[in-house]
């Protein structure tokens, strides 16, 4: 809170992200041997051809203001990509390049919710989503999934029941961060049908769509919708191509929203740096082998992490179907922030506290396993005494 400054109360009181809070704590200790597994990113840098394309763009002077909704060649490439990955035909008019998945989420929130409006959000979920709804002036109503022997499940009836007269949109993130839950196509179709019948928007965050372990790609709402449905699909270059620091994403919307998006982009970052977009174009055109490699690395890491965590008697964990997180409970440890601090202090390992992920997340810890096997093994060996 900054009472001495007259800023919008809802902004002044925004809660800090507990992930940032724990990372700040860990970094403040100055431990050189700290193994940070708290953020959603791997430890492999962006593939060389993508970097080269960005550098070439800079050298070629692609450094000026650009078209708000993205370079035509990148939008065309994204249209082709969605066709290849999901078997859908998405014209470029529906595609907008954004300065990250996060910006796409923010723009969606700005378009859909204001004071008095609600967005139903399937949780546990990445905290930035509810925060973006709050920044836009709306209220995020979290609808918790349940954890059973088969992993996380969403009760669609409970989700529908949470949609009241103030609800404007439903936010789904599948594959989910932090749970790794993957929504099946039949459930997507049911949800889309419900949204249609109630005139609600669906915002589908599909940034982990390629990170699934039992099929080439997770189902997309694009596969169960019509071009004019109230649907916004959020995507990002961050995870698939190790580009978290480049800040590049995209969104698919009904074509009619094009002029609105052009305005919102102009009035926020005024478009994404051209050399960054050129790097993104190379990612789409040449990045498939990297995605395949990343999935295999993550699969091996997932299996290792599950085997080790699963052998600790107090730990309850299910192998995630998608994304790259182990989201696990520790018996007798209801305070996840306190436990995350202890793991930093006693083991020198940085994990995200489950409390960050809203309803259904407390009492859990999130470990990002998109890292080298040796560092994961070292981290788990150091953590074992705390978790045993
Ligand atoms: C579920 C989800 N959506 C969106 C993003 C945003 O990614 P970026 O802003 O790096 O494109 C993330 C990043 O962690 C995420 O986990």
Image: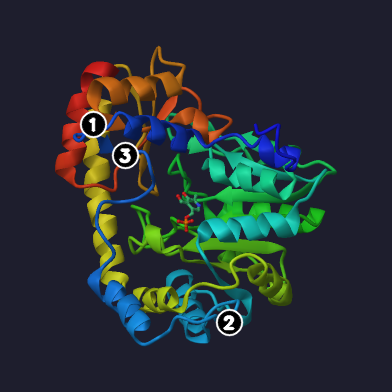
The residue shown at (57%, 32%) is: 358
Give residue 31's mark. 1
- Look at the numbered disc 3 and give the secondary structure of its residue: loop
> Tag 1: Cα neighbours inside 10 Å, few (<14), some, or many (≥20)?
few
Label whose residue precedes the other's in the sequence (2 or 1): 1
Q: Secondary structure at mark 2?
A: loop
Coloured how? rainbow
Q: Is residue 284 above or below residue 351?
A: below
Badge 2: residue crowd in 10 Å (few <14, some 14–19, many ≥20): some
- Hey, which residue is sitting farthest right in the picture? 165
From the image, tell me which residue sits under label 3: 37
Residue 96, labelled with which disc? none
Does mark 1 have its CB less than 8 Å from ligand 1?
no
Q: Secondary structure at mark 1?
A: loop
Q: Position of residue 149 (x, y in %)?
A: 42, 29
Whether 93 is drawn above or below 149: the answer is: below
Which badge, 1 or 3, is on the more N-terminal residue?
Answer: 1
- Specify whether 6 is left or right of 144: right
**Mark 2 = which residue?**
67
The quarter of the displayed image where residue 11 is located: top right
Eye-nearest disc, 2 or 1: 1
Q: Position of residue 7 (x, y in %)?
A: 73, 42
Query: Distance between the Cα atoms at labels 2 and 3?
Result: 37 Å
Is 299 situated left or right of 232 in this image?
Answer: left
């Amino acid at each position: 809170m900054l009472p001495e400054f007259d800023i919008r109360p809802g902004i002044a009181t925004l809660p800090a992200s507990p992930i940032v809070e724990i990372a700040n704590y860990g970094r403040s200790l100055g431990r050189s041997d700290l193994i940070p597994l708290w953020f959603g990113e791997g430890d492999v840098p962006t593939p060389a051809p993508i970097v080269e394309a960005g550098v070439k763009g800079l050298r070629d002077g692609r450094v000026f203001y650009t078209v708000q909704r993205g370079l035509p060649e990148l939008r065309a490439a994204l249209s082709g990509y969605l066709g290849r990955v999901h078997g859908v035909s998405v014209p470029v008019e529906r595609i907008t390049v954004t300065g990250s998945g996060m910006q796409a989420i923010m723009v969606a929130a700005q378009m859909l919710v204001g004071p008095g409006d609600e967005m139903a959000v399937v949780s546990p979920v990445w905290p930035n989503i509810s925060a973006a709804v709050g920044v836009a002036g709306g209220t995020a109503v979290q609808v918790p999934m349940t954890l059973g022997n088969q992993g996380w499940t969403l009760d669609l009836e409970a989700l529908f029941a949470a949609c009241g007269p103030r609800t404007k949109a439903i936010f789904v993130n599948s594959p989910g961060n932090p749970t790794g839950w993957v929504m099946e196509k039949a459930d997507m179709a049911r949800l889309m049908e419900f949204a249609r019948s109630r005139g609600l928007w669906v915002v589908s965050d599909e940034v982990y769509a390629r990170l699934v372990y039992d099929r080439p790609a997770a189902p997309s709402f694009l596969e169960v919708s019509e071009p004019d449905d109230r649907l916004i699909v959020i995507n990002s270059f961050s995870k698939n191509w190790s580009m978290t620091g480049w800040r590049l994403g995209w969104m698919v919307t009904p074509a009619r929203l094009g002029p609105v998006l052009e305005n919102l982009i102009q009035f926020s970052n005024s478009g994404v740096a051209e050399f960054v977009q050129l790097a993104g174009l190379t990612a789409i055109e040449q990045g498939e082998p990297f995605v395949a490699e990343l999935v295999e690395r993550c699969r091996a890491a997932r299996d290792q992490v599950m085997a080790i965590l699963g052998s600790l008697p107090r730990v309850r964990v299910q192998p995630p179907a998608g994304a790259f997180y182990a989201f696990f409970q520790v018996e007798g440890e209801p305070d996840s922030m306190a436990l995350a601090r202890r793991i930093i202090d006693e083991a020198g390992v940085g994990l995200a506290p489950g409390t960050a992920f809203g309803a259904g997340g407390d009492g859990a810890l999130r470990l990002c396993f998109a890292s080298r096997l040796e560092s994961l093994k070292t981290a788990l060996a150091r953590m074992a005494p705390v978790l045993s």
